[in-house]
Image: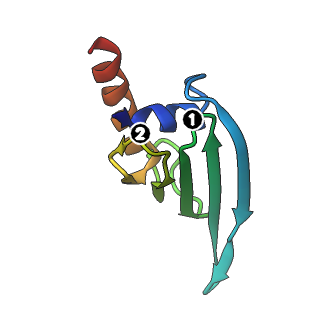
Amino acid sequence: MDNLCAYIASIKGEATEPVIVCRTSRDNSYTDQDLTVDSQESVFSFSNGVVVKYSTESDQDDSDERLCPECWISYEVLSEPAGLQVCPRHKTFISHCQELFWLKINKQHFSSG
């Protein structure tokens, strides 16, 4: 069983394995009531056959840069080859700080185990 943490670390450029072989991205940004919403979606294909969708959405406002602004981040395993199971299959975060903390804790857990 593979942990989604390894794929997220690779997507974030913090790991070289598993290897990304293809990335497609789409900008879904929009304006709603004079507020610009930055919305991105990327699909990553890995050399072992796993495919992961990475989505982000955030407001472009003038919030305090010392705080971790709220945003929506999602990772979803779209497909995996027979005999390989990635867990969890889906993970969402409400800020980059929460995402970084989860990644740090999980990378420590799996590198020590």
Nearer-the-camera pick, 36 or 39: 39
> At 56% across and 32% down in the image, what residue appears?
10
Where, by quadrant of the figure, is residue 4 drawn?
top left
| The residue positioned farthest toward the front in the image shown | 82
Mark 2 touching mark 1, by CB under 8 A?
A: yes
Q: Amino acid at mark 2?
A: Leu
Mark 2 / mark 1, whichever is N-terminal: 1
On the question of residue 70 being in view, the answer is no
Q: Is residue 77 above or below residue 109?
A: below
Q: Position of residue 70 (x, y in %)?
A: 44, 57
Nearer-the-camera pick, 21 or 64: 21
| Quadrant of the snapshot with the C terminus | top left
Drawn side of residue 75 relative to residue 102, left or right: right
Q: Amino acid at mark 1?
A: Asn
Q: Position of residue 94 (x, y in %)?
A: 39, 56
> At 57% across and 42% down in the image, what residue appears?
49
Q: How far apart in space, not on screen, are marks 2 and 1 (Cα)?
A: 9 Å
> At 41% across and 35% down in the image, what residue appears?
5
| Quadrant of the snapshot with the N terminus | top left
> At 50% across and 54% down in the image, what residue appears?
79
Q: Which residue is mark 2?
A: 84
Crowding near pointer 1: few (<14 within 10 Å), some, many (20+)?
A: few
| The residue positioned farthest toward the top in the image shown | 112
Nearer-the-camera pick, 81 or 33: 81
Does dot 2 land on a helix, a strand or a loop? loop
Residue 48 shows which numbered tag? 1
Drawn side of residue 64 relative to residue 88, left or right: right
Q: Is residue 84 above or below residue 51?
A: above
Crowding near pointer 2: few (<14 within 10 Å), some, many (20+)?
A: few
Residue 71 shows which numbered tag? none
